[in-house]
Structure formats: structure tokens, C-alpha cells
Amino acid sequence: MVRFFKKSSESPSSIEQKKVSNSLESNIQEMKYLFSYKHNKDFSMRSIKIQFNNKEGCLFYYSSIVDGSKINMHVIKPLLENEGSTVANVVSIENIKETKEFSKVIQNMNSGKVILFIEEDASAYAMDVADFQHRSIFKSENEPTVKGPQDAFTESLNTNLSLIRKQLHNNQLINEGIQIGERSINEVNMVYIKDLVNNDILEQVREKLKDISVDSIRNVEILEQYIEERPYSVIPTVLYTERPDKATAYLEDGFIVLLMDSSSACLIVPVTFWSFFHSPEDRYLRFLYGNFTRAIRLLCFYLTLLISASYVAISNFHSEMIPPDLLLAITASRERVPFPLIFEVLIMEIAFELIREAGLRIPNPLGPTIGIVGALILGQAAVEANIISPIIVIVAALSGLSSFALADLNINFMVRLMRFVFILAAGAYGMLALTGVFLLFFMYAASVKSFGVPFFSPMSPHFLSPEDTVFRKPVKKELFRPGYLYPKDIQKKSKS
């Protein structure tokens, strides 16, 4: 049976294009209709007699997202008692916006503002009294450091902006808002230093944000998937961080930071391969200590990406490369194992991924315990049952543990996915296939660009830079900003 539904007499777009009337009663009825007055429990309205012009007025707001005491003290009380010539002169609210369109009224209302309509006035006045609930500032859980600031972003946009401005005292620091979304209109804040950022890159990011046509984007985690140039690529082109000090450091080099409400992190664009390996702690530590941690991190990158595949290739196809004593030990350990070597490696790699995912989803008090106990029991039982050999446990453990040294979530997933591709290639044709696949992957990565910036800059192609790629120089020797950004001021004011 087919049902036919009655088409709405007015579409949302036609309603939102209406102008504010000079009739208070007409505006009240329009607001009641737009915000479903009888059904919307937290939609509130209050009629008042305005003192300074002796006219009737009406306030509208969502009681769940505003500060009620602020409305009473700074809006209602001044309107009832004070004399003046305009609303702005009477109301003691810092931010007052006047609008003549209901589309702006809806947007301001959803942003936590109180709306004032006045009889015989064809304008609506939006006053900021928002009080959205959010967490207090805590330590960064996903990007911890031993030395340096410990605060992290929260889900409050204003709090996040204050954390950045607290560290970066610069009158050229610009916070530009861009509205996105058709049904739920949210604001993306582009933060940059005006006298450093490259205008072409800035305009490219601005246009990409304005071109987004979608019902709603709630946070930067979803926004990231709309602004990246290759959504099907395994290689990330946007940097995600929850640390204000890291965002500030990139701003000082001419990068652009994107912030949104409801996100306890920010996006940094454009980025290069090296950005995903740099930690704020590298700069807080002394020169040699910081470079030592980077060397460990790059070693871990190799181990987690290629150690399992290299073991499969060498053991299956190039056993002459293994010293005789070690080869005999490997052969003896695999004597009673019924599966091919590649199958053993895949079993352990998949098991490690299962334990990792289970540890993340289990409640915090149990997560680490389940992960450690699960890995020990699983590995020991598999060895005793002759399903896998002991050396495979060591290889898989090295591969899995090394991946934890890569703190950035996107690069971590890239490495974990590519690890399986390399293992399959090594199991097919040994080092020949592994080398070929690695070269293809490297060539593909070299072709990737992030908002026009080559992925391996400034090493390839070469650009003038602070030479902070694989290893960094002493802070006093860093004289330039990244040349691949073409900043307006490439030279840092640094004295050697």
C-alpha cells in the first residue's frame, strides 16, 4: 500500500529568507512557528515593557544553552529600569548584533544568544549570553609529554582560543570565522598570523571551507574528511593535535589552524611527512636529547613498517643471508609448526591488532590489564600448542610495540595498514617484491600534496627551512621559517 504525504506549504529555505517585521505580534508568531513553540520544551520567550522608549518588547532564547542570571542582570533589568537612546546604550552586554533577516535570527539563537524584538522596529537584536557546558582543562591524554606545558584543548571554542592567545601574544593573530552547514549551521575558525601566512594558501583553505555543501559538520574530526584532497588515500594530509603549544608553534611558522566547537583538538594545514614525527617535547628537551628521541622514533617507524615483512622475505626466500647458527635455531623452533611462515606472521599481527582494539574499547581501569594479560596468555598458549614459533612472537611484539612510539593517530593507522601489504608482498616474491612495493609506496607518497605543498618538503623538493626535518639544529641556530610555505617573513628574529 502506497501512502501519499501532504507536502509542506513552506520550505525551510523560504521561511529563513523572510525579513523581520515592524509588527511585534507578527515577529512573535513567526518565532513560535520557526522554533515549534508548543513542542520545544527549552524554547523560552518573555514579554517586557522597555523603559527607554516606552514600547513593548519580547525576548527569545533556549534556556538550556544560555546563562539565565546574565539575561536577568544585563538584559532584562537594564531594559526595565535604564534610560537611553538605543538598545546598545542600555543593555550591558559586550556583543550586540542587529539583524533584519530571520536566517540570522535562527543562527544567532542556535549559537546561544538571546533575541530581542521591539514594537515598531524592523530589526532583531542578538545578545551573547551563551553558556554551553564543557570539560575543564585537563592534561593531554593522547599526546603526553614529560617536559613542557600539560594543558590540552577542550570542547569549548572560546577556551581553546584563549589557550592559544595565552601562549601567542601577537596583535597580528587573526581568528576568522566561516559558517558551514545547511541545516545545522556551525562555525569553523581559521586562526593564522596575518603578517606571516601565505595569502594563496589562506585563500585556498578559505575557498575549500566555503565550498562545503552538507547538512551539518559537528566537529573538526568530520571536517578533516571534507577538506583533505585525497579521501581514499592511506596517507594523511592534515595534522590533528589536541595540544595548544603544538598548534602555537605551527602558527609561528606560518601555518593555519582550524578550530570548532565540540572538538577537543584542532587541524593544522598544510603539513608534510616530517610533521607527523615531530613532538613538542623535541624542542623542550636539550638539543642532543631531543634528537635522540627522534632517532628512536624513526627506528620505530622502520621496525613497525618492515620488520615482519623483512623476516618473512629473508626466511622464506633468502635464508643464505641468515648466519648458520641463527638459521638452525629458527629451523628448530619451526620444526613442529604446521603452518607456512607467512601464515604465522599474519596470525600474530592480527591477534595483536585485536588486543589493541579490545584494550581501547574496554573501560579504562581494565584496558591495560586485559592488553598485557591477553598478549602474554595468547602468545604463550600459541607457542605451546605449536601454532606459531617463539621467534614470531618476538618479531610481532617488536612490530606492535614500535607502533606505539608514533603518537599521531593518522600516521599510526597508515603504518599499521601498510604493514600487512608489505607482509603479503614479501610472502609472494621475497625481497624483490618487498622492494618493489616499497618503491611504489614511496613514489606515491612523493606525489601527495597538502594544499599545494609537496609531502616530503623541505627535503624533496629542497626549500630554505630551519633544518628541522629528521633532526633539528640548536634553537639559536634556527634562522628561517619553512620556505615551502612562502611566508611573508621567512627569517626569524633569532640571534646566534
Image (spheres, rainbow, N blue to C red):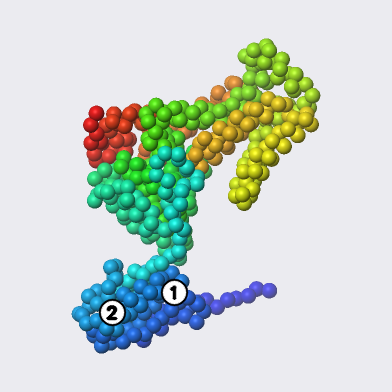
Quadrant including the C terminus: top left
Q: Could you classify mark 2 by the number of other residues whose Cα lies within 10 Å: few (under 14), some (14-19), or many (20 or more)?
A: many
Locate residue 116: give its quadrant: bottom left
What label sits on residue 226 in the rendered view?
none
Measured as percent of width and height from the top left, residue 295 is found at 46, 27
Question: Which residue is found at the position 58% from the left and 34% from the top?
Answer: 401
| Disc 2 to disc 1, C-alpha distance | 20 Å
Q: Is residue 480 left or right of residue 337?
A: left
Residue 306 appears in the picture as rendered: yes
Q: Could you classify mark 1 by the number of other residues whose Cα lies within 10 Å: few (under 14), some (14-19), or many (20 or more)?
A: some
Q: Is residue 254 above or below residue 297?
A: below
Q: Which residue corresponds to mark 1?
A: 63
Three-letter amino acid code at disc 1?
A: Ser
Measured as percent of width and height from the top left, residue 304 is found at 56, 31
Tag 2's secondary structure?
A: helix
Question: Which residue is found at the position 64% from the left and 46% from the top?
Answer: 358
| Of residues 464 and 386, the one drawn nearer to the viewer in this rendering | 386
Question: Which residue is found at the position 64% from the left and 12% from the top?
Answer: 323
Measured as percent of width and height from the top left, residue 75 is found at 32, 76
Residue 56 appears in the picture as rendered: no
Q: Is residue 335 left or right of residue 304?
A: right
Q: Earlier in the sequence, mark 2 or mark 1?
A: 1
Question: Which of labels 2 and 1 is toward the front?
Answer: 2
Question: Which residue is found at the position 22% from the left and 78% from the top?
Answer: 86
Q: Is residue 259 left or right of residue 51?
A: right
Q: Is residue 172 above or below residue 185?
A: above
Q: Which residue corresponds to mark 2?
A: 78
